[in-house]
Every structure is written in C-alpha cells, then in structure tokens.
C-alpha cells in the first residue's frame, strides 16, 4: 500500500548492545592486577506511544528507517557501559501496528499515553571480568553486544469515531456535516473540496459524538477510506438527487465500501438523498436501509435526519 496520512510502512531497529571490554587493573603495588573490563550497555528500544497531539501519520511519511541508540561499551574498573536511549515514535490514538512479515497485529493503541515496545535493543556484551577462573586469572576475552531487533511494521490510523459521512464527489457531505454538528468545514461548489478526512464533534444529551467528513469515494481513495472509517459505528451515505440514477450511485458505494463490512465490523447504514429540491415525484430506492430525503441548502429534512442519527448513536453509547 502506498504511504498516506493514515497508513505507512516503516522499518524499525533496536539499538545494538555495547561491546564488553578487555581491561586489567593498573594500581600501585599491584603489578599484576586482575581483569576489570565491564559489560556493555543495552541498546535502546523502539517504543510506539499514543499521543493526543497527533491526528495523522503524516510526520512519519519520510522516515523509512527508524533506529534506537546503541549501548555504550563497557568501561575499566568493572564499570557497566551506559544503556542506549530509547526512541519513542508518537502516533495518534487509534493506531494499529502490524508486523508486516508475520501479518499479525502487534498492538492497538486506543488511548492517549498507551505505549508498546515494538523492537528490543540488543543486550550488552560481557567484559573480561566475567571470564576469570582459577586457571585463567588474566582472560583476554570479551563478547560483542548483540544486535537489536529489526522489524518491518505497518501503521494504520483508524480514528475512534461514531459516524462517517461518505459519498461520491460534490454530493454535499461537508454541508451535511455542518448542518449536523454546527461546524464550519470547507465547502465549495466543485468536486474534491474535502481532500483529507476531518473530524467534527457534537455534544447531545451530555454525550460527545465524533463525526468524520471524508474525501469522495473513488477508485484512488477507497483503500485508505476503508482504514479511516473502520471504527465508525454508523455510515451516513450521501447520494445526489441532482445526478439522478440514485440506485447506481448507491451500488457504486456499496460495492467499494459497504460490502467490506458485511461479515466483520458490521455498521449501521443510513442513506441521505440530498438536493431533493431538484426532484419531481416520489423516491423509489429499494435498498433495505433507512432513507432520508433532504435538502441541506434549503434546510429540508435535515433536522429529522439529525434527530434520528443522534437517537441511534445514544443507543450505541
């Protein structure tokens, strides 16, 4: 999958352990001082931490390899080498971390401050103090530090949201979000106004709900749209009455988006048919989901739709 703000692949590597030291005491009246080479320090770990200051993975797009610091070599006088510093990678809460090689989930960081070690640093090598014996009191042996773990990871950011508004270009998704939440998304009368998913919140009955405005559904955006709406409880599908062929519009979205959630991560579907001020005659759309004819521009049907959505969301909280 190509890099984008919601899915990236990164190689991570824990720091190498510091080497053990070969050293002997040199002190007055001890011409034959024994071994005093210390052990090497442990390499730093790679740690992923959920951070509420981040709202996408864009800060990682140019980092193909992330390494932790190496441990320091052992010192004389039996002193242990300093451990390498850990490297902390901040990600937004809601990030899922996959091991690309094993195709498995390593961690899912849902809350601010949660963290996971994803690559351990290598252990430090042994200094020659560890190899002295009754028959070898001056060992000239030490071991090198071990390499840190190396992994290829994939990060997917799926925001923790209540409802996502989806549809093809210029159907009025952003205008509907504004009508529901009272927010002020960028709205214009041309396609692709919304280029990245945006989150909007609303408080109702002392409960807070999060809505997502999404870029238009098309063959280029669908892969990462499936990622960012993964946690949504509701999908609000906006169709454009002004384009006619409502069934074809819905089938296009159903095939590319809704069908992926039928067996797992099932979602409630609500269909809003916008721009009904342009329609003459009744609406016949046999799709098996709740349908709300609306005109956001003229504020027709939007309050009824908003009430229904909020009531349903309250039942899910």
Image (cartoon, rainbow, N blue to C red):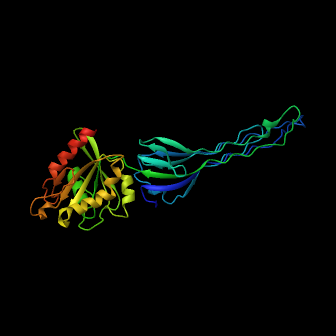
Toward the viewer: 27 or 61?
A: 61
Q: Residue at x 50, y 56 (%)?
A: 9
Q: Find residue 300 and report its horizontal and vertical position in percent.
A: 12, 55
Quadrant into which the C terminus falls = top left
Tell me: residue 299, above or below residue 114. below
Q: Quadrant of residue 165?
A: bottom left
Tell me: residue 98, above or below residue 247. above
Residue 223 showing in the rendered view: yes
Question: Of all residues shown, which one is farthest toward the left?
Answer: 281
Q: Quadrant of residue 285?
A: bottom left
Left/right placement of residue 5 relative to residue 72 reads left
Left/right placement of residue 175 relative to residue 144 reads left
Q: Find residue 97 and report its horizontal and vertical position in percent.
A: 48, 48
Question: Of all residues shown, which one is farthest toward the bottom?
Answer: 190
Q: Find residue 93 and report its horizontal and vertical position in percent.
A: 41, 46
Residue 171 showing in the rendered view: no
Q: Find residue 13 and report its horizontal and vertical position in percent.
A: 60, 51
Left/right placement of residue 47 relative to residue 222 reads right
Left/right placement of residue 20 relative to residue 207 reads right
Toward the viewer: 169 or 138?
A: 169
Toward the viewer: 274 or 15?
A: 274
Q: How many numbered marks have been drawn onto this rendered protein structure?
A: 0
């Amino acid at each position: 999958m190509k890099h984008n703000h919601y899915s990236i692949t990164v190689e991570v590597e824990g720091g190498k352990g510091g080497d053990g030291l070969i050293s002997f005491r040199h002190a007055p009246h001890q011409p034959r001082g024994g071994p005093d080479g210390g052990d090497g320090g442990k390499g730093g770990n790679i740690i992923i931490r959920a951070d509420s200051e981040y709202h996408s993975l864009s800060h990682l797009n140019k980092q193909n390899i992330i390494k932790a610091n190496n441990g320091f070599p052992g010192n004389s006088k039996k002193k242990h080498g300093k451990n390498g510093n850990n490297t902390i990678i901040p990600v937004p809460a809601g990030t899922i971390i996959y091991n690309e090689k094993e195709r498995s989930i390593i961690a899912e960081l849902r809350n601010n401050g949660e963290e996971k070690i994803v690559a351990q640093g290598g252990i430090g090598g042994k200094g020659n103090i560890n190899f002295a014996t009754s028959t070898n009191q001056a060992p000239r042996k030490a071991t090198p530090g071990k390499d840190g773990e190396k992994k290829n990871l994939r990060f997917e950011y799926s925001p923790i949201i209540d409802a996502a508004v989806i549809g093809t270009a210029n159907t009025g998704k952003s205008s509907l979000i504004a009508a529901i939440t009272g927010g002020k998304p960028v709205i214009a009368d041309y396609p692709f106004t919304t280029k990245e998913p945006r989150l909007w919140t609303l408080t109702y009955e002392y409960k807070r709900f999060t809505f997502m405005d999404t870029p238009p559904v098309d063959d280029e955006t669908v892969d990462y749209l499936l990622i960012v709406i993964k946690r949504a409880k509701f999908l609000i599908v906006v169709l454009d009455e002004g384009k006619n062929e409502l069934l074809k519009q819905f089938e296009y979205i159903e095939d590319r988006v809704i069908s992926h959630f039928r067996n797992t991560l099932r979602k409630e579907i609500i269909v809003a048919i916008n721009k009904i001020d342009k329609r003459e005659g009744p609406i016949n759309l046999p799709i098996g989901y709740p349908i709300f004819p609306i005109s956001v521009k003229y504020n027709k049907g939007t309050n009824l739709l908003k009430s229904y959505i909020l009531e349903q969301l309250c039942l899910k909280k």
